[in-house]
Amino acid sequence: MLIVFVSMLALLSGTKIVITTFISSSYFVTLPIMTSISITLLVLAKKGKLGRWGKMFINQMQRNQRGKRAIFEYGTSILLLTIIISTIYTIHYGENSSLTPMKQELYKEVPQLKEKNIQITSYVLVPSDKMLKGLLAVPAVLMYQYPQLAVMLSALNDQSSGWLLNFYMVSLIEYGQVFGLLVLYRVILPRKNIKFPVVHIPKIRMTKRIALVLVFIALFTLSYQLGTYAHVGTNDAKTVMSTFKATTNHIDAVGIFTHNTEVALLMFVPALGVVIGTGAGYSTGMVYNAAVVLSPALATKLPPLALLFMSPFGIMELTGYSIAMSRSFILIGSIRKKTLRKELKPTLKEIGLVVGILLVAGFIEYSMILSGSKGIG
């Protein structure tokens, strides 16, 4: 499952970024190309032209079309599409002229909504207790205060110069494409599984492997968090940030990928990789702390853990580093037990997996840097 997911993510995400960067960002161009690639993969897999990967792809898609997994896949897809479409409709409804007096009253009570200063590079984390209360209040608001909700969303959309509506329109197109492909696979896929020889991996071993990756995600996060608490003076902060800017200045997607891959490959080194990974987490936290020392407002706009868990590339890089660090830990035992040769093949597979993850993450991060540099409003 993981191999199919990562390879499809790398192919489709990489292709889309290349198209939007060098050809056109219009969905009238990207949507047909992405759909054609997905259909072509399915047809070639059915004809047996993609080898073992094609059979894995067919089997994985079939598993998503049966039983409880199918109910979950289609149920969540329909729910998300319903939320997205409802939000788009609500924003348009809030622009109705009959609600103009209500919007003007809102501007009087919250004059900050008139300030068009929102940028997509700004993040604010809502406290968990307030978020829970807000989610529980949604049904009541939809039933009894829908016009007020529509006016609020419309005002937020105006403040962001249309970014809010654009975000949901993009989400509708993207997730609509995914749902359409899911339905298409259900229609085209054969009814019976394609059997092929596969090396059996005991469930217990795989569970332990995943658990170990989670342990090192926690370790990297902890070292990063400790780095954010390190004492950094103003002069030291300026030195750290100047070094960081010199390293990352004029960097592109390939540069990001190359840098991250070099660090990740060192993390595969037995024993030393754990130390390197922990040090990388701590130094990243120090860079964040240095930025906060020079710009204190950053701490409220972008909390430290948001860098790791609130961006797709952050999660992907964290996962890649944790896979490498955990493999480094496994190799320590292999050397001690003199079974290093046995671990060579899974290590090479995981190196390929991590490189694929970081490749996609690099392009996603670069595209977000370009978007963030433009700003909105």
Image (cartoon, helix red, strand yellow):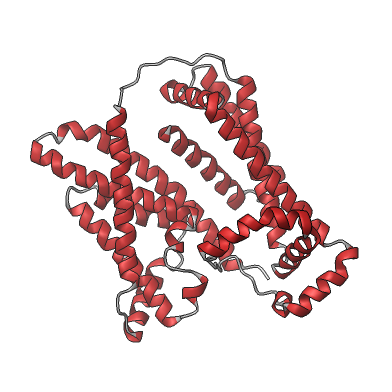
Residue 7, given in percent of the width and then of the height, sits at 45, 36
Residue 223, given in percent of the width and then of the height, sits at 29, 63
Q: Residue at x 72, y 77 (%)?
A: 110
Q: In screen coordinates, is 213 left or right of 52?
A: left
Q: Quadrant of residue 100?
A: bottom right
Q: Residue at x 66, y 33 (%)?
A: 180
**Image quadrant in which the C terminus is located:** bottom right
Whether residue 254 is visible here, answered yes or no, is: no
Residue that lies at the very extreme toward the right in this rendered image:
98
Q: Residue at x 35, y 71 (%)?
A: 228
Quick check: 125 above or below 183?
below
**Image quadrant in which the N terminus is located:** top left
Question: Which residue is nearer to you in this view: 261 or 225?
Answer: 225
Residue 128, given in percent of the width and then of the height, sits at 51, 62
Q: Residue at x 69, y 60 (%)?
A: 164
Residue 240, given in percent of the width and then of the height, sits at 34, 76
